[in-house]
Amino acid sequence: MTRWPGRDRRCEVTAVLSRLLAKYVPAVLPLALGILSVHCASYTPRWRVGDWWVTRSSDCGLDKVGWRLGYPYRRYDITRMATIDGQRCYVVQIEYRHGSMEPGDTREEHYVSAVDWAVLRQVTLMKDCGEFGPVLTWNFPHGRRWPGELDLCLPWFPVDGNRTTETLSFQNDPIDLYGRRYLYVQDTRAESSSVVRCLEAGDAPAEPVLRPSQGIVYSCRLEAEAPPDSATEERESSVQLWCAGYPWRLYDERRFPYSGYEGIVLRSWLIACGHSDK
């Protein structure tokens, strides 16, 4: 029988490596994957056309700033994809409702960039003679990510719990009265006690709020203020809880101080979500 020394040597080395891998990899691999998951875990919504969700809000402080909550429920639907200035966008339709199943007479469409999750266009629709039609349209060429009462106010995704505070300048926003603002953004991993406290506050006897289903809960804070050279000291903020398994934040609280009041003026909770192929 002819022997091939080179090939035999390679076979021996291969056999030794195979035994080492079989012995040590099963023990080391879970640890390595665990370390990687700690450093690489992050969250980005996975929206699809047909996704929908419903939120319920509480105007815990709107009366203190001279406002009232007309529609405590909001129904969100991803109705289609569109292109704005060359960017692919999710079209998020919002219907304002008095009850979770009661259709409203006011809707909005927010065109959300699929690249950086900023709102590029906002359209307000009102019902007239039984049909909805556009009455106001705003375009935001630089993207809008504002913590106002009616804004989507989406963070920069993905969030990973390690984002440092960023300072950004926005110019020529057609809705913003001051024309230029600074936006501070930070996301961290939420403490479990804080998550429980925030979500329990939204439970109703026949309408509990949704709870984290898996993984890490991320706390995202967006805070906007007028520039240092502005005559106003107005500051607005949003604190949100996001978790894998859901298309929308589980919790959101808004602050926009007015006449010396600096507490929370609006809270909202996710109470239902799903997908429709219609």
Image: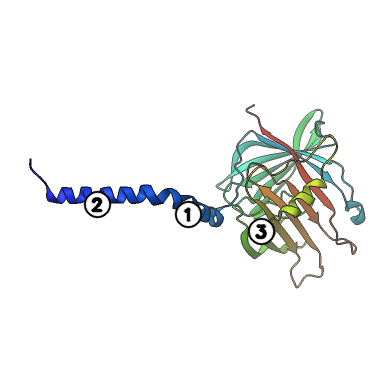
Residue at position x 60%, y 44% from top?
89
Image position of 71 (left or right of 5) = right
Give the colour scheme shown.
Answer: rainbow
Q: Residues within 10 Å of mark 3 (few under 14, many from 20)?
A: some
Q: Quadrant of the N terminus?
A: top left
* Disc 1/disc 3 C-alpha distance (Å): 23 Å
Where is residue 84 shown, x and y percent of the image? 60, 46
Which residue is tagged 1?
32
Label 2's element?
A: helix
Which residue is tagged 2?
13
Image position of 20 (left or right of 7) = right
Disc with the residue nearer the chain's start (3 vs 2): 2
Which residue is tagged 3?
188
Q: Is residue 268 above or below residue 104?
A: below
Q: How many marks?
A: 3
* Disc 3/disc 2 C-alpha distance (Å): 48 Å
Q: Is residue 18 visible?
A: yes
Residue at position x 68%, y 49% from top?
242
* Disc 1/disc 2 C-alpha distance (Å): 25 Å
Q: What's the amino acid at mark 3? A: Thr
Q: Residues within 10 Å of mark 1 (few under 14, many from 20)?
A: few
- Nearest the camera: 212 or 7? 7
Q: What's the amino acid at mark 1? A: Ala
Q: Quadrant of the C terminus?
A: top right
Q: Is residue 182 above or below residue 50?
A: below
Q: Nearer the viewer, mark 3 or mark 2?
A: 2
Q: Is residue 252 above or below residue 77?
A: below
Where is residue 16 shown, x and y percent of the image? 28, 51
Label 3's element?
A: strand
